[in-house]
Image: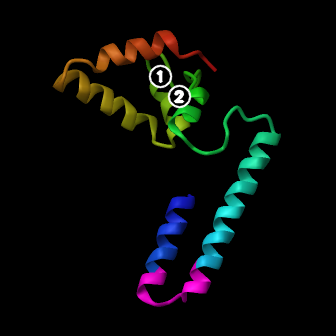
């Protein structure tokens, strides 16, 4: 992930392992490769701008047909976010038992999110 690479570069720079010029050069290289990758995604017909924003990820959200227990919402969230679907199931269960609105959110997502 780009953020992890930039964080590691910053740590190396702070530790003195990289000079200012080396840090800027490596940072530019990572950012330019990110831009090139997002351009490739756009050319393949991706529906996002490649910026990883919440809105673009939300547009990619689809209920899973394969990774589902009830409606496939957690499987779809897992694919989009990169977090395992069992974690999403746990989050919905905790929100249901703790605050009482986890099931309502799940039902709304089940209704409004299209199936893949």
Specify the segment rendered in magenta.
12-23
Crowding at dot 2, Cα within 10 Å, few <14 / some 14-19 / many 20+, comes out as many
Give how far across and how far down residue 35 sits, in percent. 71, 55
Image quarter (top left, top right, bottom left or bottom right) of the C terminus: top right
| In front of the other: 68 or 17 | 17
| In front of the other: 73 or 42 | 42
Distance from disc 2 to disc 1, alpha carbons, whole Å, reads 5 Å
Disc 2 and disc 1 in contact, CB within 8 angstroms? yes
Question: Who's the residue at 48% across and 73% down the image?
Answer: 8
Q: Secondary structure at mark 2?
A: helix
| In front of the other: 36 or 98 | 36
**In the rendered view, does 40 fall on the left or right side of 109?**
right
- On the image, which quarter does residue 23 sit in? bottom right
Residue found farthest to the left: 98
Magenta stretch mostly in which secondary structure? helix
Crowding at dot 1, Cα within 10 Å, few <14 / some 14-19 / many 20+, comes out as many
Instruction: Give the answer, above or below, for where 39 lies relative to 64.
Output: below
Give how far across and how far down residue 57 sits, in percent. 56, 34
- On the image, which quarter does residue 109 sit in? top left
Residue found farthest to the top: 111
Q: Is residue 20 magenta?
A: yes
**In the rendered view, does 24 fall on the left or right side of 11?**
right
**In the rendered view, does 15 fall on the left or right side of 103?**
right
Q: Which residue is under mark 2?
A: 76
Question: Who's the residue at 73% across and 35% down the image?
Answer: 46
Point out which mark residue 73 bears: 1
Question: Who's the residue at 50% across and 63% down the image?
Answer: 4
Give how far across and how far down residue 41 sits, in percent. 75, 44
């Amino acid at each position: 992930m780009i953020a992890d690479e930039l964080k590691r570069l910053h740590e190396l720079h702070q530790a003195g392992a990289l000079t200012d010029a080396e840090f800027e050069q490596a940072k530019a290289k990572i950012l330019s490769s990110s831009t090139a990758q997002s351009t490739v995604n756009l050319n393949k017909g991706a529906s996002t701008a490649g910026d990883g924003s919440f809105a673009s990820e939300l547009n990619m959200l689809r209920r899973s047909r394969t990774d589902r227990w009830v409606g496939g919402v957690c499987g779809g969230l897992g694919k989009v976010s990169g977090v395992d679907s069992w974690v999403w199931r746990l989050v919905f269960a905790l929100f249901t038992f703790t605050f009482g609105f986890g099931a309502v959110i799940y039902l709304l997502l089940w209704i409004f999110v299209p199936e893949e």
